């Protein structure tokens, strides 16, 4: 199950041996609501390889600002606490899996 990030706990959530996918979203964002169940499904299938962290841009604006998130949904991919890749916009499940596999 995805972890919820706040301005206070975000950095600690990135410290994982797995690929960490940070989902920047908001409740009012239609494409975010389309991507969320796909991301949840993929997380369930690949929980041994990935960790999903959710950042509500309205609640954690400091994090969104730090990474210059201008459009949502945005997914940032982290390895060893460092951002290694980024996607913007909703995507189908197979495209998400391909992006994850390219970053493992």
Image (cartoon, grey):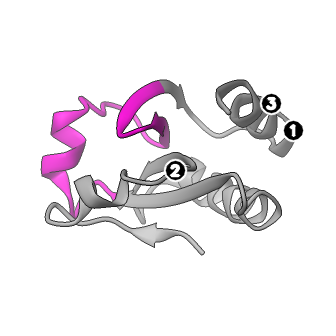
Q: Is residue 93 above or below residue 85?
A: below
Q: Is residue 93 above or below residue 58?
A: above
Q: Which mark is residue 94?
A: 1
Q: Callout 3: helix, strand or loop?
A: helix
The residue at 64%/28% (across/down) is 103
- Mark 1 and 3 residues: CB-CB less than 8 Å, in contact? yes
User: Nearest the camera: 103 or 96?
Assistant: 103
Calculate the distance from the C-alpha at mark 2 to the C-alpha at mark 3: 20 Å
To which quarter of the image does residue 38 belong?
bottom right
User: Nearest the camera: 48 or 31?
Assistant: 48
Query: Within 10 Å of the Cα at label 3, are there few (<14), some (14-19), or many (20+) other Cα atoms?
Result: few
The residue at 12%/49% (across/down) is 62
Figure disc tally: 3
Question: Seen in the image, is 75 located left or right of residue 9?
Answer: right
Q: Which mark is residue 98?
A: 3
| 2 or 3: tag closer to the N-terminus | 2
Residue 82 among magenta residues: yes
Question: Seen in the image, is 40 located left or right of residue 55?
Answer: right
Q: Position of residue 95 (x, y in %)?
A: 80, 32
Query: Within 10 Å of the Cα at label 2, are there few (<14), some (14-19), or many (20+) other Cα atoms?
Result: few
Residue 12 among magenta residues: no
The residue at 35%/60% (across/down) is 13
Q: Which residues are magenta?
A: 56-84
Q: Position of residue 57 (x, y in %)?
A: 28, 54
Q: Which mark is residue 17?
A: 2
């Amino acid at each position: 199950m995805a972890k919820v990030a706040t301005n206070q706990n975000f950095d600690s959530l990135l410290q994982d041996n797995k690929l960490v996918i940070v989902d920047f979203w908001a409740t009012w964002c239609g494409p975010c609501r389309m991507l969320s169940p796909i991301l949840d499904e993929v997380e369930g299938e690949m929980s041994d390889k990935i960790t999903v962290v959710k950042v509500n841009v309205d609640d954690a604006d400091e994090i969104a600002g730090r990474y210059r998130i201008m459009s949502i949904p945005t997914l940032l991919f982290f390895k060893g606490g460092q951002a290694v890749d980024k996607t913007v916009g909703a995507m189908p499940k197979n495209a998400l899996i391909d992006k994850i596999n390219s970053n493992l």
